[in-house]
């Protein structure tokens, strides 16, 4: 990631006329000053009257600097941008949401961040809690006595401090909690009443270093010894790579553990790149659900090591059905600290023989120390199926990948999103920043905002940011691209446009087949056609250069060349590529039939 200052090379903060009021005179100056003390570089927001005092403090007290405001056209985009930023930076950004209505707008993206275990400090606001201070009508509508209840089931912690003094501690606590493992969003609600009142009494500012997030706990040494013994004696060990640190050092340790044990590696698309996808120990491309190659590797294993795997019970059930799991299972992860019961993201209960209630990376480090000696031979893996040639002349995502690779060459690329039909064999991920994983909650419309946040975090890093999105996702989140245009964030969006909510076509087809009904009607109520939305025109309406729809190889090559030039110039670009939804249809139908 680029240094904070380097990320702003190509834009200047909106000018603030001086002189600034550097004193702490008003309640809202306190949360603004706390953000600077916490080292927060940006705050994404859509303005609202419930935090007009706080907005004034960001401008006329801090000068729109440290943090700098990132203006967004929708609260959901503001949260998604902070989510994408956290995926790269590994630390929280801040978002401001306007009263209950802004919180409701942003709640979908908050749910995604919760599901992805992404850190985020969200500052909300409510109309004056003191009814005597409320303006008629609007302040009553926008005042909520327990606003955090709207999203409490998918935040790590929330608070509504009753004074500026209480806000200092709330923000210090919130910053510590959101960045500690397991990470998740926190929400702090600022009362408009004390925001706009003069500060009374003395303020005591905390030493941020004394409220830093704690280091993750170390695993139990006795359990490490037992796990090392199992892995060392295994004949066909398998390591499942889920959530982990997105650093080169952490990736190198994971690879070393697989090589030391001779384990077959499986990667989860939901988590992103944790190990190189083309390593000799890696069994086929990363998976979203079990494929035949991964199933063969799992069903012959005698020891499974799960390192932060998302839905361990689910993959074991896919591999072994409802019967017993014959292999010994070792699992590392602290996700259960956030399991509440309102949501069911605890997934199916897996059988586990040795469990480490801590993040996966400390377990990797301690297992390596407990397993000295040379690397074992790479496992004999089943052959990966050869990619099927496309039928007809319609463009596919394989064509898109080939055109991008030819134009971008060896320049490092970060994919904040990848379509389901992405050819991992053609473009394997080898660095922890190559692919950032999925959105966490399956909330459509998140892709553009996540991509903008990743581009913000990576600006000045030397990496290109390329997101391959579906048309439905793009259309729901298209106005997030305005923020990329305003702040000159280099980002390429490639839309694999099949003019349909095609995943649901497959579900409808599967339902009709089970019921003995007409499968040919699966498209009804699903097609985004007649007319097809002009996605390139919509992007240009946000100030983003765009082209499309692209329907030919020649057109694709020209579009990618223009897009690459725009990226190198430090600006966003969108390509709308019309693809045939029937490509890869058989595999997709099988997935839908199984409930995917």
Image (cartoon, grey):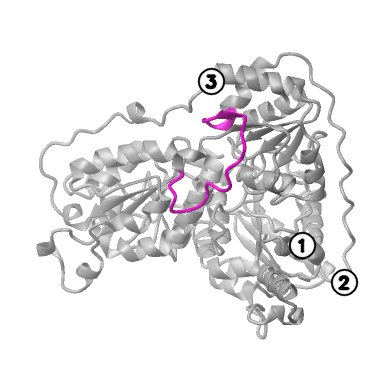
Residue 229 is a magenta residue: no
Dot label at residue 393 = 2
Percent coordinates x, y for residue 516 in the rendering:
75, 78
Q: Which residues are magenta?
A: 339-361
> What is the total number of numbered labels drawn onto the structure image?
3
Circle 1 is placed at which residue position?
Answer: 590
| SS class, disc 3 | loop
Q: CA distance from mark 3 to mark 2?
A: 57 Å
Residue occupying the point 51% across, 63% down: 480
Residue occupying the point 30% across, 61% down: 99
- Between 419 and 264, the one lying in front of the other is 264
| SS class, disc 2 | loop
Percent coordinates x, y for residue 132 in the rendering:
9, 63
Which image quadrant: the N terminus?
top right
User: Can you see residue 334?
Assistant: yes
Closer to the chain start, of discs 3 and 2, is 3
Residue occupying the point 54% across, 63% down: 481
Circle 3 is placed at which residue position?
Answer: 220
* Other residues around mark 3 within 10 Å, as few (<14) / some (14–19) / many (≥20): some
Closer to the chain start, of discs 1 and 2, is 2
Mark 3 or 2: in front is: 3
Q: CA distance from mark 1 to mark 2?
A: 24 Å
Q: CA distance from mark 1 to mark 3?
A: 42 Å
Dot label at residue 432 = none
Q: Is residue 587 above or below residue 299?
A: below
Percent coordinates x, y for residue 221 in the rendering:
56, 17
Percent coordinates x, y for residue 551 in the rendering:
79, 73
| SS class, disc 1 | helix
User: Can you see residue 39?
Assistant: no
Closer to the chain start, of discs 1 and 3, is 3
């Amino acid at each position: 990631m680029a240094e904070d200052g380097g990320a702003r090379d190509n834009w200047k903060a909106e000018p603030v006329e001086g002189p600034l009021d550097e004193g702490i005179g008003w309640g809202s100056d306190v949360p603004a000053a706390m953000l600077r003390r916490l080292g927060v570089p940006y705050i994404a927001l859509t303005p609202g009257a419930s935090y007009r005092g706080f907005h004034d403090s960001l401008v006329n007290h801090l000068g729109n600097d440290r943090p700098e405001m990132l203006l967004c056209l929708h609260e959901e985009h503001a949260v998604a941008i902070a989510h994408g930023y956290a995926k790269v930076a590994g630390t929280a950004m801040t978002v401001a949401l306007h009263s209950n209505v802004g919180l409701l707008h942003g709640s979908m993206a908050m749910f995604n961040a919760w599901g992805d275990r992404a850190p985020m400090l969200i500052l909300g606001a409510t109309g004056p809690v003191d009814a005597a201070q409320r303006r008629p009508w609007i302040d009553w509508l926008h005042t909520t006595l327990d606003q955090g209840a709207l999203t409490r089931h998918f935040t790590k912690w929330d608070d509504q401090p009753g004074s500026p003094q209480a806000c200092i501690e709330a923000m210090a606590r919130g910053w510590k909690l959101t960045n500690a493992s397991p990470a998740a969003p926190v929400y702090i609600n600022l009362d408009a009443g004390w925001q706009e009142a003069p500060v009374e009494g003395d303020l005591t500012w905390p030493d941020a270093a004394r409220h830093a997030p704690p280091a993750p706990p170390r695993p139990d040494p006795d359990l490490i010894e037992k796990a090392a013994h199992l892995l060392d004696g295994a004949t066909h060990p398998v390591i499942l790579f889920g959530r982990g640190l997105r650093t080169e050092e952490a990736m190198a340790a994971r690879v070393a553990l697989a090589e030391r044990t001779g384990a077959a590696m499986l990667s989860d698309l939901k988590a992103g790149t944790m190990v190189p996808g083309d390593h000799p120990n890696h069994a086929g491309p990363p998976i979203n659900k079990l494929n035949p190659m991964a199933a063969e590797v799992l069903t012959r294993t005698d020891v499974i090591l799960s390192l932060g795997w998302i839905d361990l019970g689910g993959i074991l059930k896919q591999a072994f059905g409802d019967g017993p799991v014959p292999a010994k299972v070792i699992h590392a992860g602290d996700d259960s600290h956030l399991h509440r019961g309102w949501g069911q993201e605890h997934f199916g209960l897996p059988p586990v023989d040795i469990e480490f209630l801590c993040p996966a990376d400390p377990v990797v480090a301690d297992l390596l120390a407990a397993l000295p000696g040379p690397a074992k031979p790479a496992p004999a893996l089943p052959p990966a199926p050869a990619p099927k040639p496309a039928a007809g002349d319609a463009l596919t995502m394989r064509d898109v990948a080939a055109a991008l690779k030819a134009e971008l060459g060896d320049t490092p690329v970060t994919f904040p999103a990848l379509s389901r039909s992405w050819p991992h064999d053609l473009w394997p991920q080898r660095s922890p920043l190559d692919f950032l994983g999925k959105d966490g909650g399956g909330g459509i419309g998140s892709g553009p905002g996540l991509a903008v946040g990743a581009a913000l975090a990576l600006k000045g890093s030397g990496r290109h940011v390329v997101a391959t999105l579906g048309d439905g996702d793009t259309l729901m989140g298209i106005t997030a691209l305005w923020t990329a245009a305003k702040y000159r964030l280099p980002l390429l969006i490639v839309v694999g446009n099949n003019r349909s909510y095609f995943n649901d076509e497959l579900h409808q087809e599967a339902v009709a087949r089970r019921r003995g009904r007409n499968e040919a009607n699966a498209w009804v109520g699903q097609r985004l056609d007649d007319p097809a939305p002009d996605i390139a025109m919509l992007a240009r309406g946000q100030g983003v250069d765009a082209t499309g729809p692209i329907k030919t190889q020649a057109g694709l090559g020209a579009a990618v060349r223009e897009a690459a030039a725009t990226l190198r110039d430090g600006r966003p670009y969108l390509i709308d590529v019309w693809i045939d939804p029937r490509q890869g249809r058989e595999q997709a139908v099988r997935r839908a039939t199984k409930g995917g």
